[in-house]
Image (cartoon, rainbow, N blue to C red):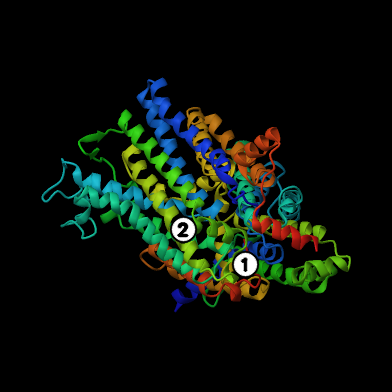
Amino acid sequence: MDQVIEQIVTGLSIGSILLLIAIGLSIIYGSMGIINLAHGEFVMLGAYTAWVLQTYLGLGLLQSIVPIFIVVAVFGWIIERYVLSLLNNRPLDTILATWGVGIMLQQGVRLLVGSELRYVQLPPSLSESVSLLGVSVSSYRVFLFIVAIALFALTWLLMNRTSVGMKLRAIIQDRTVAASFGVNAKRVFSLTFAYGAGLAGLAGALVSPLKSVSPEMGTGYVVDAFMVVVLGGVQSLAGTVASAFILGELSGGIAFLENDTVAKALVLLAIVVLIRFRPEGLFTTRVRA
Amino acid sequence: MSSKPTTVAGPQRLTIEIAPLVIACLIMFIVPAILNNDFLLNKIARYLVLGILTISLALSWGYGGILNLGQAMSFGIGSYCMAMALKLKTIPVHTGSRGLPDFMVWNNVEALPWFWAPFKSLGFALGAGLAVPALVAAALGWFIFRGRVTGVYVAIITLASMVVLNLVIIDQQRYTGGFNGITDLAQLEIFGIAFDAYDRATYYLVAGAVTVSLFVAFAFTKTKAGLIVQAIRDHESRVRYFGYDVAAYQIFVFALSAAIAGLAGMLYTVVMEFASPTFLGVQLSLSVVVWCAVGGRQSLVGAFLGAVLVAGMQGALSETPAFVETWTLVMGALFVLVVLFLPKGLAGFAEAAVAWVGRRRVVPTMAQSLEHKEGST
């Protein structure tokens, strides 16, 4: 029984990390139709910002959350403004462009700070563990879970209760009509992309104490986060949450299985079949070449 | 997506289009006469093989509008077909009985698996290197295009399928050599000619294959099916409303492109003298997309030159490690710039320059002129 609960808690913890990363990816894809292959690099940038702030300015992880968000969001804003906004009507080319941007970010970091592994310290106040249902859980993982849920709630509020969110939803429904009502789509897109990037950076910073920080750390995450988006369906933030935790639990369970490779292959196959048979159901907007 | 003029304006137009192909092939055959360095020739042969792979992607992506991010899957299958045949030709030093490949002996495999057995025949292997990638692509294409999956989803499905195959090959070490791939191969020998990787014969074999692939692909784009494929790229629904079976044409071009990639894979094994799971890795597969985009996805020669130049430069710079790091950064930037400002790649740039010099007017395609009219109403 303890083992089952432990397994579930591990799954929840993986799920909350996935959720943190996937929210940004999901709103960027859902609203702008851009598959952001540089998303993993935003995660990486966030982790490195945390490391820089900690090593050179002595800031703890909790104090640096806001600066990290801003730094990575600014990166995202610049990339949207100077690269992606030029590719308005070429959705397929945005995959290529974001991939190129990702390579540049990764390589840039490697040149600047080197490819050695870096480590970020746990906030001292969260390094203990707490007991949940008789199982001892690291309190940092509980903290991650709460942050993930809080950021999800914040995003939901932004989308549904603010004027920027309303404009964004209007653009998603019909860009031309929204524009004729005076909505500045370009500005809203820049803000959305910056917000998504900032969230990814935050996710990277928050995972950094659990994993080592390296220039290529983002690559693995972007694949997993992308699966979350595919499974959950775009424009449904709730779907993203559900699928993040489903995949989290699955990955937790897979760790139990003997053959990791075959399990990975099976998950990929499942995604392929899913896209083939339910593309509209999962992604509400169809992208045509 | 903009397109290359496809309306045939007499034999003169055809001459202009064929000229770059002929020039590229001639240069390729002259090189060994000037260059008396077998090591360098082997390297060039390697880039030429990657060029064939890029031609195959230009065919499906540039002409068919199918962004196949898993193009290296066909390449890898071809490469393994060749490697299996050449492995069975070796005289194993460490092997026990029945001529089992050495890695199978190390993994305690008792008998040759059934899917290895036919590869004792070189003819079968050569056929399989073309047919297996084509059939796999046809099956995958049937799965994708019969469901009318388009755009981004095609890219994801092809990429994911390739990763699955890659994982399976690494996992099934007993039968595939796993992570190490298949190494210590015999030399390819056809009609008494041995193709040593560092021999001129191999270079000419590769150059011949480039020529054949270029002209086969070029000829295909001029056939009726080839024109319909390009029309599908420009406007899928319109072609469907004309009553064409869109999926059938897409599946065909997808399979043809896979067969050419398979050919490239077989040659790669001959040139590199091994087969490895990295041949169907994400890294290579995405690099091919870069080469194709830089060279010009809608020009077969352009894509080919893009691969040879970019891969060649990368290879030349990889001798100095410090440079390689910067090079990756430069390549990323170059790629972004090409995607942004040169959607037709260097070939499009050259074409525009030629048109500007000759003050020729480029004949717009049907779809383009239709769209233009629609836009103006």
Q: Quadrant location of the C terminus of chain A?
A: bottom right
Location of residue B289 in the rendering, given as x and y in whole percent from the top left corner: 54, 48
Secondary structure, mark 1, is helix
Q: Is residue A228 visible in the rendered structure shown here?
A: yes
Q: Pick out the residue farthest to the right.
A: A182
Mark positioned earlier in the residue sequence (2 or 1): 1
Q: Residue furthest left?
A: B97
The chain that hosts pointer 2 is B
> Of discs 2 and 1, which sits in the foreground?
1
Position in image of residue A255 (x %, y %): 43, 66
**Mark 1 crowd level (few <14, some 14–19, many ≥20, 10 Å Cα):** few
Residue behind mark 2: B254
For residue B37, side relative to residue A100 (left or right): left
Structural distance between the alpha carbons of marks 2 and 1: 20 Å
Q: Is residue A141 visible?
A: no
Left or right: where A107 falls relative to B95 = right
Horizontal and vertical percent for residue B347? 60, 40
Pick the front one: A117 or B89: B89
**Nearer the observer, B227 or A152:** B227
Identify the chain of the residue marked 1, using the numbered disc in the image.
B
Residue type at tag 1: Arg
Q: Give the residue displayed 42% in from the left and 40% down from the top.
A: B210
Question: Where is B113 relative to B47, above or below?
Answer: below
Q: Is residue A1 rendered to the left or right of residue B154?
A: left
> Of the residues shown, which amino acid type is indicated by label 2?
Phe
Whole-percent x and y of residue A234? 65, 70
- The tag on residue B238 is 1
Q: Residue at x 65, y 75 (%)?
A: A238
Q: Residue at x 45, y 43 (%)?
A: B214
Check if mark 2 and mark 1 are on a common chain. yes
- Dot 2 alpha-carbon crowd within 10 angstroms: few under 14, some 14 to 19, many 20 or more: many
Q: Secondary structure at mark 2?
A: helix
